[in-house]
């Protein structure tokens, strides 16, 4: 069972809307829905969870490239919506997709500690996790700093489990609006 919601930042706080996953067939669809929920091109955070197996966060800021985080890549990769995120993070989407440049190691410029990096950067793409030759490893994947400026630190985000979306909403000050759409 999935739960998904969009949190759109406004000058008065956050507005939440239930995200109807039946209408989402691709990651581009999810990004389009997030952008359409934005108020004055402000931040929109899409939250997705599959029971207690994994959660994902997609952050859209206006026309900037979206940023992603998945709590457990292996569990997410086994689900239809989670696999959209893991494939994007591992570089497995079509070249035509509008989201072709991501920082796959999950770091910001100048940081030393990657979240998901490969020992040998020259490794063939078909040998990387998620391409069919190896299973996607368990653990976080993506940009753990995507909510740092909103009150959810990267260390906290990487250790969340259980009711992670409620904890994220609490840190954002959006608990009531998220619970209203649950």
Image (tube, rainbow, N blue to C red):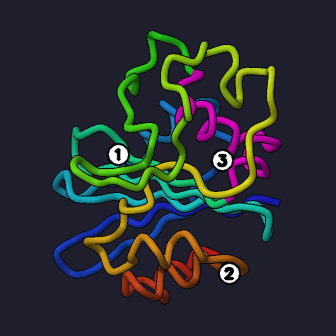
Could you classify mark 3 by the number of other residues whose Cα lies within 10 Å: few (under 14), some (14-19), or many (20 or more)?
some
Magenta stretch, residue numbers:
72-92
Question: Which residue is pictured at 45% across the width and 18% down the height?
Answer: 97
Residue 131 is inside the magenta segment: no
Nearest to the observer: residue 23 or residue 115: 115
- Quadrant hosting residue 123: top right
Badge 2 density bin: few <14, some 14–19, many ≥20, Cα 10 Å = few
**Residue 113 x %, y %:** 41, 55
In the picture of the structure, the residue carrying the numbered disc 3 is 21
Residue projecting furthest to the front: 120
How far apart are the alpha carbons under marks 3 and 2?
19 Å
Count every numbered label the image shows and give the total. 3
Cα separation, mark 1 vs mark 3, equals 15 Å
**Quarter of the figure that contains the N terminus:** bottom right
| Relative to 142, 125 lies left or right | right
Element at badge 3? Answer: helix
Which quadrant is the C terminus positioned in?
A: bottom right
- Residue at 49% x, 65% y is 17
Mark 3 vs 2, N-terminal side: 3
Task: Report helix, strand or loop for mark 2.
Answer: loop
x%, y% of residue 11? 16, 75
Q: Compare residues 38 and 58 and report the one nearer the observer.
A: 58
**Does residue 85 show up magenta in the picture?**
yes
Q: Residue at x 76, y 47 (%)?
A: 74
Residue matched to label 2 = 163
The image shows residue 143, relative to residue 98, as above or below, that is below
Read off the residue under disc 1: 36
Q: Main secondary structure of the magenta part?
A: helix
């Amino acid at each position: 069972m999935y739960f998904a919601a969009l949190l759109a930042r406004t000058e008065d706080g956050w507005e939440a809307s239930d995200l109807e996953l039946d209408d989402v067939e691709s990651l581009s669809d999810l990004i389009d829905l997030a952008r359409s929920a934005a108020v004055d091109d402000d931040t929109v955070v899409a939250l997705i969870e599959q029971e207690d197996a994994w959660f994902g966060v997609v952050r859209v800021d206006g026309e900037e490239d979206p940023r992603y985080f998945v709590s457990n890549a292996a569990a997410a990769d086994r689900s239809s919506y989670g696999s959209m995120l893991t494939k994007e993070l591992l570089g497995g989407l079509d070249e035509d997709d509008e989201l072709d440049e991501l920082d796959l190691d999950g770091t910001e410029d100048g940081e030393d500690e990657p979240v998901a990096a490969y020992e040998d950067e020259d490794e063939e793409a078909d040998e990387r996790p998620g391409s069919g030759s190896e299973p996607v490893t368990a653990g976080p994947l993506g940009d753990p700093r995507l909510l740092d400026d909103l009150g959810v630190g990267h260390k906290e985000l990487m250790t969340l489990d259980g009711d992670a979306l409620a904890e994220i909403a609490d840190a954002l000050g959006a608990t009531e609006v998220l619970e209203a759409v649950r």
